[in-house]
């Protein structure tokens, strides 16, 4: 590369605008660190600009346009034509990682995507480069800022779900369409990327089972508050036995003392567990224009400076069909003899062991809050289906996973 590196930016949204500003402010510093001065060659938005012209005028393409269409085509073309690409697009990397890596190899170009997972936290770098030779057992954490902000504000300030979501959108934390945030698809894409890097296994987005926070009710948050628990949307990627991995996203109660319990607002945190390191926790801003732009700039510095991070997939791990979790179960039932017995009978038949039960009277009805010991998710779900059909139930059962693991 010459002493000037021409950077073409795709996208003029929250992150695109913040990145352009940051790049211009920091050009001198980047030159000192990486040995060449970056200069914006042009900015293309969904509506304006010509990609061919921008590509011809750029050494590096920074893709911040979001979505997979036309981002996929642009990024593949850029890589094939030997332009390094930096992207913050988790759906693109999670859904089309193989194609992107093939295009990068073909063009001898680098592909970097630090900003695609956990915003400003350098988690990709740590998992891929620093821990490269360490067999990671588990990567998990809070990887969506919007949902963490919503859960925090509903619990802390008593905001409604709608009010909290609106604020998250105003602050620029949410995706253009926040359905992916609240439904768990955004976190699922990030976990697919982390799992591929951590385990060297080809985890596709379809392999990730996910739930979001749309079903969380103020009752669940009140329960958490009463018992001093935190409610978080967690992404978990872990080895199951010697041959399998499981990758999931789900809302979950955490006991106090868990390193993820105090992570609030739009902050993300990712924990990595491996035998030699016990565990590492990284936390920081997970969403927002300037925060994400800073991770993008870090990648631009890396591509200017050299290096070639790609997915290296050599393990034979497959996706596990079942895993174990502890659950909380919230039931509203008619208060009459035999009700509790029937519920525990169904749980017992499915070999689900109850750890605690609290019953509160509500006139002729009662609220039952039960916490289960760790159990096969499949067995618990089959018991839940049977419980949902019981005639004395006043509303559909609600269950949320619980993590009781203590960290000292
Ligand atoms: N919408 C994402 C979030 C932005 O809320 O975490 C960062 O990927």
Image (spheres, rainbow, N blue to C red):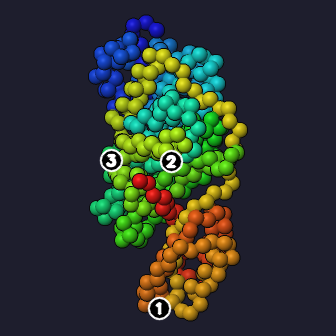
Observer able to see residue 304: yes
Q: Going by the image, does 288 lie left or right of 46?
A: left
The Cα–Cα distance between marks 1 and 2, rounded to whole angstroms, is 42 Å
The residue at 37%/32% (across/down) is 293
Q: Label 2, on which residue? A: 140
Q: What element carries label 3?
A: helix
Residue 395, image x, y percentages: 52, 78
The residue at 64%/18% (across/down) is 106
Q: Nearer the viewer, mark 1 or mark 2?
A: 2
Residue neighbourhood size for the residue with mark 2, other residues' Cα within 10 Å, grouped as few (<14), some (14–19), many (≥20): many
Instruction: Work out whether 266 lies above or below 375.
Output: above
The Cα–Cα distance between marks 1 and 3, rounded to whole angstroms, is 44 Å
Q: Earlier in the sequence, mark 3 or mark 2?
A: 2
The one nearer the camera, 154 or 260, is 260
Q: Is mark 1 on a helix, strand or loop?
A: loop
Name the image quarter holding residue 314.
top right
Q: Nearer the viewer, mark 3 or mark 2?
A: 2
């Amino acid at each position: 590369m010459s002493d000037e590196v021409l950077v073409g930016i795709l996208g003029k949204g929250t992150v695109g605008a913040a990145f352009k500003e940051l790049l211009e402010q920091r050009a001198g510093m980047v030159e000192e660190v990486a040995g060449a001065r970056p200069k914006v060659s042009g900015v293309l938005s969904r509506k304006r600009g010509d990609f061919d012209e921008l590509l011809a005028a750029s050494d590096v393409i920074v893709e911040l346009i979001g979505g997979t269409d036309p981002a996929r085509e642009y990024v593949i073309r850029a890589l094939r034509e030997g332009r390094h690409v930096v992207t913050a697009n988790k759906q693109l990397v999670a859904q089309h990682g193989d194609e992107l890596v093939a295009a990068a190899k073909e063009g001898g170009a680098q592909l970097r995507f630090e900003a695609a997972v956990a915003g400003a936290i350098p988690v990709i770098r740590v998992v891929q480069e620093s821990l490269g030779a360490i067999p990671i057992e588990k990567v998990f954490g809070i990887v969506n800022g919007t949902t963490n902000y919503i859960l925090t504000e509903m619990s802390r300030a008593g905001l409604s779900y709608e009010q909290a979501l609106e604020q998250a959108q105003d602050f620029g934390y949410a995706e253009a369409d926040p359905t992916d945030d609240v439904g768990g698809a955004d976190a699922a894409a990030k976990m697919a990327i982390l799992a591929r890097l951590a385990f060297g296994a080809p985890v596709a987005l379809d392999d990730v089972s996910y739930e979001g926070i749309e079903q969380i009710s103020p009752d669940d948050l009140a329960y958490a508050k009463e018992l001093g628990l935190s409610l978080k949307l967690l992404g978990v990627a872990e080895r199951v036995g010697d041959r399998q991995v499981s990758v999931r996203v789900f809302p979950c109660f955490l006991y106090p003392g868990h390193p993820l319990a105090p992570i609030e607002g739009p902050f993300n945190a990712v924990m990595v567990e491996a035998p030699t390191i016990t565990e590492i926790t990284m936390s920081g801003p997970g969403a927002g224009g300037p925060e994400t732009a800073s991770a993008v700039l870090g990648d631009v510095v890396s591509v200017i400076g050299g290096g070639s991070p790609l997915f290296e997939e050599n393990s034979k791990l497959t996706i596990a069909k079942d895993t174990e979790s502890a659950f909380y179960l919230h039931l509203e039932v008619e208060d009459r003899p035999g009700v509790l017995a029937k519920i525990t009978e169904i749980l017992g038949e499915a070999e689900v062991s109850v750890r605690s039960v609290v019953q509160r009277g509500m006139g002729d009805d009662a609220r039952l809050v039960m916490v289960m010991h760790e159990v096969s998710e499949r067995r618990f779900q089959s018991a839940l289906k049977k419980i949902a059909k019981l005639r004395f139930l006043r509303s559909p059962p609600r269950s949320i996973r619980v993590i009781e693991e203590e960290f000292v």
